[in-house]
Amino acid sequence: MNNPMPTPNPMRMQPPANALDRLAQEQSKPEETTEFEPVIIVFDSSSPAYMQGLDAYNLKFVQDAATAMDHSLQQRGHLFLNELNDYLKVKRTPEGQLLGWISNDDSPGRINISVEKDGDVIRAMPNVQGLIQPFI
């Protein structure tokens, strides 16, 4: 019996277009510094942790996230951005599985989060160190 060859998926032949693929490509170039867009986490009513009308509570919650995640970083030695997203109860991102923080004797990492309030939206801007997978 004659089995036809499967038709290649043209989407698999396309050059990488998303940020995750770009980060992976840049990682393969050790001489160059990997740069990425600043991380902005939108903390608003889409998060179950957000409390409508309680601005001070929401700002404190985001700042407390930095403290809690920093403790995890110091204990484990690494922390992915998606772990911070989980704490804030916002959606995970593909980049969040690559970016994060490392803390060891050579590089005592710390997590800091700058915040901007715009109406009912808080923009959390963590000081992500960069790609951490190669260091784990």
Image (cartoon, helix red, strand yellow):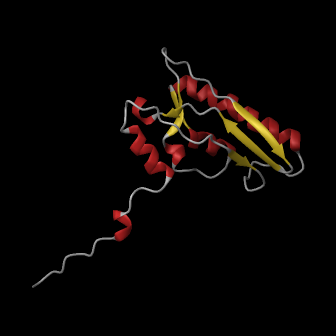
Q: Nearer the viewer, residue 9 or 135?
A: 9
Whether residue 76 is visible, yes or no, is yes
Percent position (x, y) of residue 117? 83, 43
Question: Furthest-right residue in view?
Answer: 53
Q: Residue at x 43, y 50 (%)?
A: 21
Q: Nearer the viewer, residue 18 or 92?
A: 18
Is residue 123 shown left or right of residue 73?
right
Percent position (x, y) of residue 127? 63, 32
74 versus 29 height, above or below: above
Q: Nearer the viewer, residue 100 or 118?
A: 118
Question: Furthest-front residue in view?
Answer: 32
Whether residue 136 is visible, yes or no, is no
Percent position (x, y) of residue 10? 35, 70
Is residue 67 shown left or right of residue 122?
left
Quadrant of residue 101 in the image?
top right
Question: Furthest-bottom residue in view?
Answer: 1
Percent position (x, y) of residue 7? 27, 75
Q: Residue at x 90, y 50 (%)?
A: 53
Locate the C terminus by quadrant: top left
Is residue 94 shown left or right of residue 86?
left
Q: Residue at x 70, y 33 (%)?
A: 113
Locate the N terminus by quadrant: bottom left
Total marks drawn? 0
Question: Furthest-left residue in view?
Answer: 1
